[in-house]
C-alpha cells in the first residue's frame, strides 16, 4: 500500500469527479466532453503547516487551475499549495 505525504506547505485533496453525466433524456455525456475541472475536494493529508485554518477531513474550495493531479489506487488526488485554498465548506442545518 502506498501513501502520499505532502511536504513544503502542500495539501493533498481527494477529487470526487463524476465519470459520466446523464441528461434528463438519458443521453450519457462522457467526462472527456467536460472542460470544467472540479474546484472542491476533501483534504486527506497536509504538510506540517503552522496554525492551519482547516484540517484533514474538511471539504475545501481551491483555485481552478492549480495543483498537480495524481492517480493512485483508482482514486484521483490533487497536490496543491496551502495558499491556493480559497475556502472551507461547513455543513449547516436548515432553519
Image (tube, rainbow, N blue to C red):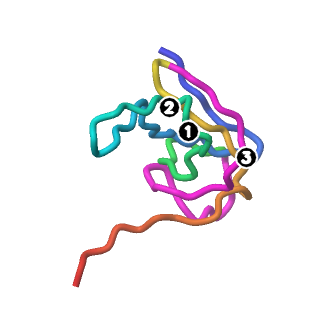
Earlier sequence position, callout 3 versus callout 2: 2
The answer to whether marks 3 and 2 mark residues whose Cβ atoms lie closer than 8 Å is: no
Answer above or below: position of 21 versus 58. above
**Residue at mark 3:** 66
Q: Are marks 1 and 3 in contact (CB under 8 Å)?
A: no
Q: In this orientation, which residue lies closer to the viewer: 87 or 45?
A: 87
Q: In terms of secondary structure, where does tag 3 sit? A: loop
Residue 36's spot in the image, x, y percent?
A: 60, 45
Label 1 to label 3, Cα distance in Å? 18 Å
Q: Is residue 11 above or below residue 69?
A: below
Residue 39 location (% of width, % of height): 57, 52
Q: What is the quadrant of the C terminus in the image?
A: bottom left
Give the residue displayed 46% in from the left and 64% down from the top: 89
Q: Residues within 10 Å of mark 1 (few under 14, many from 20)?
A: few
**At x 46% / y 55%, what residue is drawn?**
59
Q: Is residue 57 magenta?
A: yes
Q: Helix, strand or loop at disc 1?
A: loop
The residues tagged by marks 1 and 2 sit, at their Cα atoms, a distance apart of: 5 Å
Q: Residue at x 67, y 48 (%)?
A: 48
Q: Are marks 1 and 2 in contact (CB under 8 Å)?
A: yes
Q: Residues within 10 Å of mark 3 (few under 14, many from 20)?
A: some
Residue 34: mark in rendering: 1
Q: Read off the residue under disc 2.
A: 31
The magenta segment: 48-72
Name the mark nearer the viewer: 1 or 3.
Answer: 1
Q: CA distance from mark 3 to mark 2?
A: 19 Å
Which type of secondary structure does the marked residue at label 2 adopt? helix
Q: Earlier in the sequence, mark 1 or mark 3?
A: 1
Instruction: Residue 5: give x, y in percent of width and height.
Output: 62, 32
Amino acid at each position: 500500500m502506498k501513501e502520499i505525504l505532502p511536504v513544503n506547505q502542500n495539501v493533498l485533496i481527494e477529487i470526487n469527479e463524476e465519470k459520466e453525466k446523464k441528461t434528463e433524456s438519458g443521453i450519457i455525456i462522457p467526462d472527456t466532453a467536460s472542460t470544467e475541472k472540479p474546484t472542491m475536494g476533501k483534504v486527506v493529508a497536509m504538510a506540517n503547516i503552522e496554525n492551519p485554518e482547516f484540517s484533514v477531513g474538511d471539504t475545501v474550495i481551491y483555485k481552478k487551475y492549480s495543483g498537480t493531479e495524481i492517480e493512485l489506487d483508482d482514486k484521483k488526488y490533487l497536490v496543491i499549495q496551502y495558499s491556493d485554498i480559497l475556502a472551507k465548506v461547513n455543513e449547516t442545518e436548515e432553519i
